[in-house]
Amino acid sequence: MENKILKNEVIDIIRGAISEDLDGFGDITSKYLIPLDKNSFSYIVCKEASGAILSGLDVAGFVLEEIDRSIKIDRLKNDGDRLEYMDRVCNISGSTLSILKAERTCLNFIQHMSGIATLTSKFAKIAKPYKVKIVDTRKTKPTLRKIEKYAVLCGSGYNHRFGLFDGILIKDNHITAAGGVSKAIESIRASAPHTLKIEVEIKDFNQLDEAITSKADIIMLDNMDAGQMGRAVKIIKEKRGSSCLVEASGNINLRNLEEICKTGVDMISVGLITHSAPAIDFSLEFKENL
């Protein structure tokens, strides 16, 4: 996988996670149990059934570096790799105290991020034959959006806008506040930079007509069934051709995904992949003393 996450992008998340576990006092169990000069060899292993997608190994590496720069990490797998049961993803050697301090924080990141990557990959696999992109949403856990959206990329998904600041998306409450779809699009087009694309969420065919007439760049079909979506896509493509992208959204899961892919939409946004992905089981094991 070509996508990479940079330490400076997630350092605040990492430091916050370390702080909530150590809180300035450190690991008091290990402090009174393990000699300061003791070193150990350990490794992180996937204990999930075959098919998990790895994500978070780079972040775990940043955690270890933040706690103790002398710790050595030998990466055996990369973020985005598909894992088999009991695959070892990395070896870790160095101060026993430092490894124990970092253990749970490292595993929390890897388990959570791999869960998102794995679920995303299941959606992406179904959508791929139809050339439909699976995109994420802003339905992420507070403060964790950067790592969760990175995990989506690891699972062959795509990122939607990152926040309210980097993409125009007119939603239902915007439409109500503006007095309708057409008025909302016209107001934004009159004041926003011409380089910004305008996406609008519509819930029925009256709103669809307004969105098409107002020449929205992207039309999101929200909470429509597959039949309605198919009809809407046909209308959009007949009137706008390839100049308007179509996005499906709302209550989409692995059971109804293929039916939605068949409607001809260009992309499908799925909140489920970030807000409800189950964690993947990993553990850190000590093998021997150095």
Image: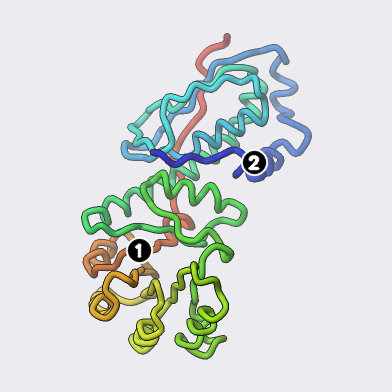
Q: Which residue is mark 1?
A: 268
Q: What numbered label is drawn on residue 37?
A: none
Q: Is residue 173 visible?
A: no
User: Tag 2: residue type?
Assistant: Ile
In the image, residue 206 sits, relative to residue 69, either above or below, namely below
Front residue of 220 and 106: 220
> Is residue 124 something one can see in this rendering?
yes
Q: Residues within 10 Å of mark 2 (few under 14, many from 20)?
A: some
In the rendered structure, the answer to whether residue 266 lies left or right of residue 92 reads: left
Q: State how many labels appear.
A: 2
Asked if 171 appears above or below 166 in the picture, the reply is below
Using the numbered discs, state the Cα–Cα distance from disc 1 to disc 2 in whole angstroms: 31 Å
Q: Quadrant of residue 26?
A: top right
Q: Residue at x 62, y 30 (%)?
A: 102
Question: Percent from the top left, x then y, of residue 264?
Answer: 24, 68
Identify the residue under disc 2. 11
**Residue 242: image x %, image y %?**
28, 69
The image quadrant where one finds the C terminus is top right
- In-image side of 161 versus 208 (left or right): right
| Left or right for 283, reference 252 | right
- Left or right of 89 in this view: 72: right
